[in-house]
Image: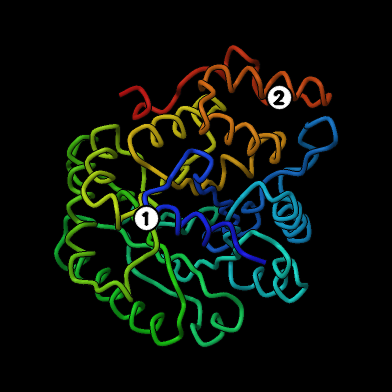
């Protein structure tokens, strides 16, 4: 079966993009950065949290459910979970593309009692590319720029070595670029400019055969998003990462603003995985991308939760608030 991702990417390349072609990825790769808490809470049929953490079978079931719903274009997983689900044939007759996280830089190490995210990011890779090529031809590679020449050279060398391996194994990738987990002395406007310049500098030395299919970056405000998305619109596809769960308004506001200023991909983890109803949040995300205003999206989401007898985590008044400062720019 043809994959929606490939169909949409072809449209992007021919200038035929429309909001219906916006790419959504479910980032269920949290186990690459954390342990027991990674899968999120167990909810009962009314939406109440029954247990603090799902087990692995629950997490895999959620991946199966979302994939079978066809509400996403990409399912991003750890290598171990991808092996399980791909071997079961989940993606064989599906329009959804399986993708694997191909490295685990230290800034995603979110284990309990760890302090890794208080330090500058360092490159690290668990996966063996020889094994990955047997499972999927698409993966995510992440890098972080720190305004430190030694750290940034180390990160870029790791990315260069990865590209050589990926190209030899015929594995495509998309590139995730995090903001530094620690203060690097820049405000949000300067951070956007710094990250944009670092990305373009990194891509300038790559030929088409090794370039990422698209980017996954933090939303650093409208000016930064528009600047990057308009720099090389025919060849550079910009996507956004979701960050923390936030409110439902935060989720929809991020989608609305990022797409307004040029993003064509959303790769959300916690904003989907921690929602009261994962399929419902995805359906409403699509509606927002296609024109529904974020505030109306929150109201619609709550209305549908009520009809399904699912109790929301927050009251409607609290869930309509924008709590992420960058979304107020």
Q: Image check: 297 left or right of 11?
A: right
Q: Image check: 222 left or right of 64?
A: left
Along the line of sight, the residue nearer the viewer: 163 or 119:
163
Q: Which mark is residue 312?
A: 2
Q: Is residue 304 above or below residue 160?
A: above
Q: Position of residue 128 (x, y in %)?
A: 50, 83
Q: Position of residue 111 (x, y in %)?
A: 53, 56
Name the image quarter holding the N terminus: bottom right
Name the image quarter holding the C terminus: top left
Q: Is residue 265 above or below residue 90?
A: above
Residue at x 61% of width, y 59% of height: 35
Q: Which residue is mark 1?
A: 215
Q: From mark 1 to mark 2, how far is it between C-alphas?
A: 32 Å
Q: Is residue 260 above or below residue 178?
A: above
Along the line of sight, the residue nearer the viewer: 188 or 63:
63
> Quick one: label 1, few (<14), some, or many (20+) residues within 10 Å?
many
Residue at x 33% of width, y 62% of height: 143
Label 2 sits on a secondary structure element that is loop
> Quick one: label 2, few (<14), some, or many (20+) residues within 10 Å?
some
């Amino acid at each position: 079966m043809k994959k929606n991702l490939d169909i949409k990417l072809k449209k992007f390349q021919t200038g035929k993009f429309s909001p219906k072609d916006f790419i959504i990825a479910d980032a269920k790769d949290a186990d690459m950065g954390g342990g027991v808490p990674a899968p999120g809470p167990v909810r009962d049929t009314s939406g109440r949290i029954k247990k603090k953490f799902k087990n692995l079978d629950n997490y895999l079931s959620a991946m199966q459910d979302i994939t079978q719903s066809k509400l996403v274009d990409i399912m991003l997983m750890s290598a171990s979970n991808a092996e399980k689900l791909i071997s079961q044939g989940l993606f064989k007759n599906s329009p959804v593309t399986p993708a694997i996280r191909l490295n685990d830089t230290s800034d995603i190490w979110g284990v309990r009692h760890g302090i890794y995210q208080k330090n500058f990011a360092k490159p690290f890779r668990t996966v063996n590319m020889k094994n990955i090529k047997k499972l999927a031809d698409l993966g995510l590679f992440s890098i972080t720029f720190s305004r430190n020449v030694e750290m940034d050279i180390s990160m870029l060398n790791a990315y260069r070595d990865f590209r050589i391996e990926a190209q030899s194994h015929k594995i495509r990738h998309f590139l995730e670029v995090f903001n530094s987990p620690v203060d690097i002395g820049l405000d949000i406007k300067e951070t956007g400019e710094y990250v944009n310049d670092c990305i373009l500098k990194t891509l300038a030395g790559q030929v088409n055969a090794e370039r990422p299919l698209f980017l996954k970056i933090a939303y650093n405000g409208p000016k930064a998003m528009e600047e990057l998305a308009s720099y090389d619109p025919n060849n550079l596809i910009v996507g956004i990462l979701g960050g923390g769960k936030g409110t439902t308004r935060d989720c929809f506001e991020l989608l609305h603003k990022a797409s307004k200023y040029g993003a064509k991909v959303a790769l959300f983890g916690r904003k989907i995985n921690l929602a009261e109803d994962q399929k419902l949040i995805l359906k409403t995300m699509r509606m927002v991308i296609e024109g529904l205003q974020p505030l109306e999206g929150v109201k619609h989401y709550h209305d549908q939760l009520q009809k399904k007898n699912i109790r929301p985590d927050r009251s409607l008044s609290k869930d309509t608030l924008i709590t992420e400062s960058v979304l107020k720019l």
